[in-house]
Image (cartoon, grey):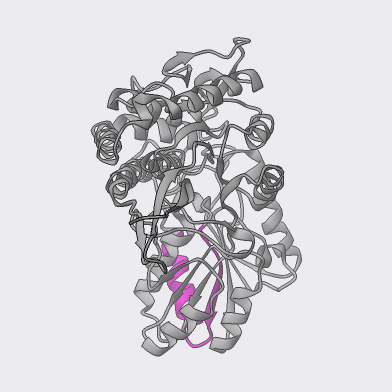
């Protein structure tokens, strides 16, 4: 395993144990084998990290850096990530089970986010507003918020950190990062590279803990943290929102999705099925923007289902360390139980399990076969709940209006995909779908340059492409000028 595999947390520029020296284990979900141990930090340790970040924010070593200097640090950090693609990818695969090819792609994507925000650091422009009076000048400047608390998930343990950290650091904030208890090792690896890149002491701090609720709530309630950026479930996101409300703390919440994938009769069948495979089964379906409900128009339905079924059955399931593997394990037993319950519920309600629908015990207890379910009734749980796994329910529809109505019939509003070769239909549908991100004839939509965020129960704010979440706007009125 890579020399970047670390066993200490990172606070105030030092690699430290928890105050009580307690550790917790990180295991490979594919094999169940131990990958490493990290400090099981408590509130006392979290407070140390917050104090370090606050002191760093006001220190000359950080606050006096100009935008170009912050940009140079981010570029150096990105360069070091690209130099260590294989080592970091090995860690991602070991602790998350993600196929190694996807893990390498995540490292490259994560580094591209840092490169983008390095450039954005130099584009935080102020304004001069035409004054209504001759003796006044009206100015607007933009300043960093302060300490940013970043709470990140396990499904993208590197890119979810860099999309938040890159924006916050570009703005001039300092960080306290709480990674998922399932994937803290990736976070520590990139923190090590940030140290090598030359970020001043205390600017980046990592608190590892198996008690996510305790640490997360403490960060939300701390008056020394000015913004909480969280990616995770809608239930927890709403809880964070309530906790931050007392201090009117700013939040950036990227929450659950229930993405529709619509295939119209005019769609290019090859393009639609290949994109469906990517949108559904990337990272074993464990992504917030994964295609969740497939709506296929009756004129193309049979051909789509037949073609999609063949491609799904050809997917290679296995251990992430193999270059041939396309589908790895689920992250934990809770995910496996959810998959089993969703399929069983659909079966009881007379849905058709076209392929899959069971675990793959010969590989390990957390492997689940890629599954297609047809004839799904509206009362089935899988029709309306976020799946977060390798199950694709397919529903037939007749008209464009019906597809839009069913696609929007959810509290979520993160992403949607649809396929059509009709230009007029493309614009009509894109404007009608109640989501923040759309893939039109495309199954993979994430890129460093574009804003990413949802509406309705899928979140507040936008990450990627912008740094506005981490900036304060200040108006200055210069009066009594001669």
Please name the residue shown 59% across and 24% down the image.
46
| Residue 239 in sight from this viewpoint | yes
Q: Position of residue 57 (x, y in %)?
A: 44, 30
In this picture, which residue range is highlighted in magenta? Answer: 289-312
Q: Residue 317: x, y in percent?
A: 45, 47
In the image as oriented, which residue stretches furthest toward the front?
A: 482
Q: Is residue 365 magenta?
A: no
Q: Nearer the viewer, residue 264 or 469?
A: 469
Quarter occupied by the N terminus? top left
At a point 54% along the width and 76% down the height, the residue shown is 433
Quadrant of the drawing holding the C terminus: bottom left
Q: Is residue 182 left or right of residue 237?
A: left
263 over 311 or under it: above or below: below
> Does 361 appear above or below 259?
above
Q: Is residue 377 left or right of residue 10?
A: right
Name the side, left or right, on which 82 lies relative to 358: left
Task: Pick whichever, 134 or 312, lies toward us.
Answer: 134
């Amino acid at each position: 395993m890579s020399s970047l595999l670390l066993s200490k947390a990172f606070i105030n520029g030092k690699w430290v144990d928890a105050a009580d020296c307690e550790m917790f284990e990180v295991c490979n979900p594919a094999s169940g084998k131990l990958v490493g141990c990290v400090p099981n930090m408590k509130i006392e340790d979290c407070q140390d990290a917050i104090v370090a970040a606050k002191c760093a924010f006001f220190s000359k070593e950080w606050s006096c850096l100009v935008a170009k200097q912050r940009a140079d640090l981010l570029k150096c950090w990105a360069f070091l990530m690209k130099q260590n693609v294989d080592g970091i990818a090995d860690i991602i695969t070991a602790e998350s089970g993600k196929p190694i090819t996807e893990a390498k792609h995540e490292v490259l994507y994560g580094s591209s986010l840092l490169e983008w925000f390095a450039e954005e650091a130099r584009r935080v422009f102020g304004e001069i507003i035409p004054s209504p009076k001759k003796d006044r000048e009206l100015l607007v400047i933009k300043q960093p918020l302060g300490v940013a608390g970043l709470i990140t998930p396990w499904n993208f343990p590197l890119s979810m950190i860099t999309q938040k950290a890159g924006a916050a650091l570009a703005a001039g904030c300092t960080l306290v990062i709480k990674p998922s208890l399932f994937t803290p090792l990736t976070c520590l690896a990139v923190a090590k590279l940030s140290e090598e890149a030359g970020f001043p002491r205390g600017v980046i701090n990592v608190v590892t803990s198996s008690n996510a609720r305790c640490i997360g709530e403490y960060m939300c309630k701390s008056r020394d943290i000015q913004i909480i950026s969280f990616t995770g479930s809608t239930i927890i996101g709403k809880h964070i929102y309530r906790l931050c409300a007392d201090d009117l703390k700013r939040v950036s919440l990227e929450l659950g999705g229930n993405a529709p994938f619509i295939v119209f009769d005019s769609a290019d069948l090859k393009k639609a099925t290949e994109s469906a495979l990517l949108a559904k089964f990337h990272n074993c379906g464990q992504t917030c923007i994964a295609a969740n409900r497939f709506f296929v128009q009756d004129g193309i339905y049979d051909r789509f289902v037949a073609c999609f079924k063949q491609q799904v059955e050809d997917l290679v399931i296995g251990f992430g360390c193999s270059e041939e593997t396309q589908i790895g394990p689920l992250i934990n037993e809770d995910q496996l139980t959810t998959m089993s319950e969703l399929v069983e519920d659909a079966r009881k309600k007379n849905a058709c399990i076209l392929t899959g629908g069971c675990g793959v015990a010969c590989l390990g207890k957390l492997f689940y076969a890629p599954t297609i379910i047809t004839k799904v009734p509206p009362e089935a749980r899988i029709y309306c709940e976020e799946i977060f796994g390798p199950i694709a329910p397919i529903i037939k529809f007749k008209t464009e209006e019906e597809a839009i109505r069913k696609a929007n019939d959810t509290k979520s509003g993160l992403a949607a995909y649809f396929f059509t070769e009709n230009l007029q239909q493309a614009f009509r549908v894109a404007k009608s779908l109640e989501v923040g991100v759309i893939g039109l004839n495309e199954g993979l939509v994430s890129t460093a340059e574009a804003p990413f965020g949802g509406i309705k129960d899928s979140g507040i704010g936008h990450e990627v492409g912008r740094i506005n979440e981490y900036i304060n706007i200040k108006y200055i009125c210069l009066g009594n000028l001669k």
